[in-house]
Amino acid sequence: MDATDFPDDLVQTQHAWNATYEALAAPHRRDTTALRRRLLRLSVRLWWHPYWNTAPSVPAARTELRQLARTRGTVRAA
Protein backbone atom coordinates (compact mmCIF):
# COMPACT_ATOMS: atom_id res chain seq x y z
CA MET A 1 0.00 0.00 0.00
CA ASP A 2 1.29 3.44 -0.86
CA ALA A 3 1.27 6.13 1.83
CA THR A 4 -0.38 8.54 -0.59
CA ASP A 5 -3.55 6.42 -0.46
CA PHE A 6 -4.48 7.94 2.91
CA PRO A 7 -6.78 10.96 2.90
CA ASP A 8 -5.22 14.09 4.37
CA ASP A 9 -7.84 14.39 7.09
CA LEU A 10 -7.09 10.86 8.26
CA VAL A 11 -3.34 11.54 8.47
CA GLN A 12 -3.98 14.82 10.29
CA THR A 13 -6.28 13.08 12.76
CA GLN A 14 -3.66 10.41 13.44
CA HIS A 15 -1.02 13.11 13.92
CA ALA A 16 -3.32 14.94 16.36
CA TRP A 17 -3.92 11.65 18.20
CA ASN A 18 -0.16 11.08 18.52
CA ALA A 19 0.41 14.63 19.80
CA THR A 20 -2.42 14.32 22.32
CA TYR A 21 -1.14 10.97 23.53
CA GLU A 22 2.35 12.40 24.01
CA ALA A 23 0.93 15.39 25.90
CA LEU A 24 -1.06 13.07 28.14
CA ALA A 25 2.05 10.99 28.85
CA ALA A 26 4.04 14.04 29.98
CA PRO A 27 4.61 14.16 33.74
CA HIS A 28 2.78 16.57 36.02
CA ARG A 29 -0.06 17.46 33.66
CA ARG A 30 -3.04 19.25 35.17
CA ASP A 31 -5.38 19.09 32.16
CA THR A 32 -5.53 15.32 31.88
CA THR A 33 -9.32 15.19 31.72
CA ALA A 34 -9.45 17.42 28.65
CA LEU A 35 -6.63 15.46 27.01
CA ARG A 36 -8.35 12.15 27.70
CA ARG A 37 -11.58 13.42 26.20
CA ARG A 38 -9.72 14.71 23.14
CA LEU A 39 -7.93 11.37 22.77
CA LEU A 40 -11.25 9.55 22.93
CA ARG A 41 -12.84 11.82 20.29
CA LEU A 42 -9.83 11.39 17.99
CA SER A 43 -9.87 7.63 18.51
CA VAL A 44 -13.51 7.47 17.43
CA ARG A 45 -12.76 9.57 14.34
CA LEU A 46 -9.85 7.31 13.43
CA TRP A 47 -11.73 4.08 14.02
CA TRP A 48 -14.85 5.03 12.06
CA HIS A 49 -13.27 6.99 9.19
CA PRO A 50 -14.87 6.01 5.85
CA TYR A 51 -11.45 5.15 4.41
CA TRP A 52 -11.41 1.86 6.33
CA ASN A 53 -14.35 0.60 4.25
CA THR A 54 -12.10 0.62 1.17
CA ALA A 55 -8.77 -0.47 2.68
CA PRO A 56 -7.68 -3.92 1.45
CA SER A 57 -6.01 -4.87 4.74
CA VAL A 58 -7.23 -2.72 7.60
CA PRO A 59 -4.75 -3.86 10.31
CA ALA A 60 -1.78 -3.32 8.01
CA ALA A 61 -3.15 0.02 6.83
CA ARG A 62 -3.68 1.22 10.41
CA THR A 63 -0.06 0.37 11.21
CA GLU A 64 1.16 2.17 8.12
CA LEU A 65 -0.95 5.21 8.99
CA ARG A 66 0.58 5.37 12.48
CA GLN A 67 4.09 5.15 11.02
CA LEU A 68 3.33 7.79 8.40
CA ALA A 69 1.93 10.20 10.98
CA ARG A 70 5.01 9.69 13.19
CA THR A 71 7.44 10.35 10.35
CA ARG A 72 5.54 13.42 9.17
CA GLY A 73 5.47 14.68 12.76
CA THR A 74 9.23 14.20 13.02
CA VAL A 75 9.80 16.06 9.77
CA ARG A 76 7.62 18.98 10.93
CA ALA A 77 9.49 19.19 14.23
CA ALA A 78 12.88 19.36 12.50
Image (cartoon, grey):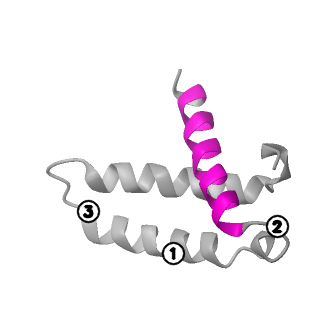
Q: CA distance from mark 3 to mark 2?
A: 38 Å
Location of mark 1 (residue): 41
Magenta stretch contains residue 59: yes
In terms of secondary structure, what is the magenta stretch mainly? helix
In the image, residue 16 lies at what x, y percent?
A: 54, 54
Compared across the picture, whether 19 is left or right of 48 comes to left
In the image, residue 13 lies at what x, y percent?
A: 62, 59
In the image, residue 30 lies at what x, y percent?
A: 19, 59
Q: CA distance from mark 2 to mark 1?
A: 25 Å
Sooner in the amino-acid sequence: mark 1 or mark 3? 3
Query: From the viewer's perspective, is residue 53 above or below residue 70?
Result: below
Question: What crowding class fits label 3: few (fewer than 14 Cα within 10 Å), some (14-19), or many (20 or more)?
Answer: few
In the image, residue 70 lies at what x, y percent?
A: 55, 41
Is 72 or 31 nearer to us in this picture? 72
Location of mark 3 (residue): 31
Q: Amino acid at mark 3?
A: Asp
Q: Which residues are magenta?
A: 58-75
Which residue shows up at 59% across the image and 56% down it?
A: 14
**Helix, strand or loop at mark 3:** loop
Location of mark 2 (residue): 56
